[in-house]
Amino acid sequence: MNRHYELPLDEAAYSFGFLDEFAKREIRRTILKAISIPGYQTPYASREMPMGRGFGTGGLQLTLALIGANDTLKVIDQGSDDSVNAVNLRHFVELTCPQVDTTERTSEATLIQSRHRIPEHPLSEQQILVLQVPYPDPLVVVEPSEARRKVMHGEGDYSRLLTKLYEDIVQFDEITISHRYPTRINGHYVIDPSPIPRYDVPQLHQSKALVLLGAGREKKIYAVPPYTNAAPLVFDDVPFRIEDFREASGARRACDRCGACDSFLDEMIADDGSKSWQCSDSDYCNEQLAVNASPAEVKA
Amino acid sequence: MKKVLEVRGLTKFHGRGCAHCIDSTGPEMDTNICAHCGSVVAAHDVSFDLHAGEILGIMGESGSGKSTVVKTLFFDDAPSAGESLFFHDECQWDLFNLNAAEQRWLRNHRFGMVYQNPHLGLNFNVSAGGNIAERLLMNDLSHYGEIRERARLLLSRTEVLPERMDESPRTFSGGMQQRVQIAKALATQPPLLFLDEVTTGLDLSVQARILDLILEIQQELGTAMVVVTHDLGVIRLLAGRTLVMKYGRVIESGLTDQILEDPQHAYTQRLVASAL
């Protein structure tokens, strides 16, 4: 026991943003590398967080490494600011990062951590979007060995992934991937863009905002830098399709709450079995409601 | 005639190897296991040339090193010594001095391989058509309709019913699996094809049809082939020239007719005499 040793003051409590400075520095360095090699899954030492792996620890570590006192943070889970994952992560950041503002408005946020959705509201150059990723490698469905997957990524050999799409078309007459659609970044690496629906994939293409993807359990960080090409993997004669939300009659469904016809809709099934559709992005829905409805009849 | 492949002094050891390995193995010593260090000399000093449109047979008993030769040329296995040049379109590749990525490129774009066991050559988790599509996709074909058309053509070319192209090869008979494998190998129209015991274990009528198919392919596409077999009938039917191997050495080589009608080496004489 060293009698002269004094406990540093900041070890008595957690430092700003929970992570220690070494961890933040390492994550920032990894982010820089990820941005330099668009789409490349950069390995990093994912830290233990005070929550289970798979609950957004990858995204949270990115957020904590990036956030500063002037930032405004928005956290969303499947488009909603009020679901459990979003509320808990936001609360955690509020606890560990004093002076950081949080918001539910997409346009006000400088940093957005999201689970499985990209906000409807177009992002700007001043914003950074952090996505939580459960499975970073799109090749995992066709090749179990990570060593061989790395070689395939390095050589840009995605023929086996395309074979899977081919099999899909043969069997079902269309590509049946609903989310985690493999997307080629900057003409080389194919990424798993986290479980965002197909609807959101085109938003990655030439995005004004920096998009960072963090997988905590798999210990990988990768990025879609601003103004970078992002092309979903397709065949020349089978174009990429997004969800179109058409009724049987062919008309585009509208949100039952705000009436928007240009957003990603969630299907709700009521107790009596009847179905209704609502915007998945709650902030967008509120915004449309405020614009459309006259002030007199704003619904709850 | 244009040369496609030139192999010189190809040698493959399994084990540490020692100074006595070469002297203490081979047909004279009647073994391919070195008595001093226990290494296996799978092939030693194998040299041959292969020209465009030619079929070269490699014949020998089990363990004679014939598959080893083909496996090293197809990069399934690294050789211990020797060199090999591949010629195509005015270009030349020094096969054993390429890096892994270049080797994979050649394998996927310029070579074709048909294994004895269809499990090695086919992916049983995708359909027969998907297996062919995979090879076409490796070659940057990305038009679904065209891929499908090419796969259908290849399969009907190798006498697999096009109606069954969307089934897994798991449900096919052995002969059909072998034909799907040939179709897959031919998908990119490779100038060089390796056939490792393709007809072994198939019944005679199916054998005959596959051999017919191989001959037709050779005549139509002018593909150069290396055929490995222990079946004299296959050699007689397909190969223009033949190497006879025993214990890792080439003991006799020359025109197939000559070897079968007038074998010089005692082992070859016994082999030919014992054929039905």
Image: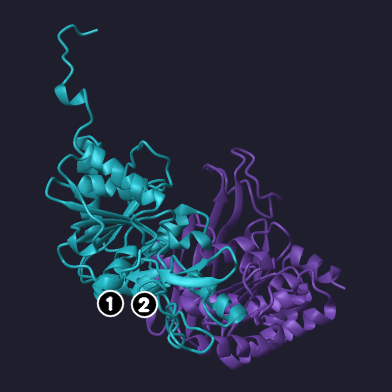
Chain colours: A cyan, B purple
Element assignment for label 2: loop
Q: In which quarter of the image is residue A213?
A: bottom left
Look at mark 1 in the image and give the residue it sits on: A292
A21 shown above or below B121: above
Tell which of B25 and A90 is nearer to you. Answer: A90
| In this rendering, position of residue A256 left or right of residue B253 | left
Q: Residue at x 62, y 43 (%)?
A: B34
| In this rendering, position of residue B179 left or right of residue B269 | left
Tell which of A96 and B75 is nearer to you. Answer: A96
- Label 1, residues with CA under 10 Å away: few <14, some 14-19, many ≥20: few
Element assignment for label 1: helix
Q: Which residue is drawn at 35% across and 51% down?
A: A86
**Quadrant where the C terminus of chain A lies?**
bottom left
**Quadrant where the N terminus of chain A lies?**
top left
**Disc 1, disc 2: CB below 8 Å?**
yes
Q: Single out the residue that lies furthest toward the left.
A: A70
Q: Quadrant of residue B130?
A: bottom right
Tell which of B189 and B136 is nearer to you. Answer: B136
Q: Which residue is drawn at 20% across and 58% down?
A: A109
A205 shown above or below A63: below
Number of numbered discs visible in the structure rendering: 2
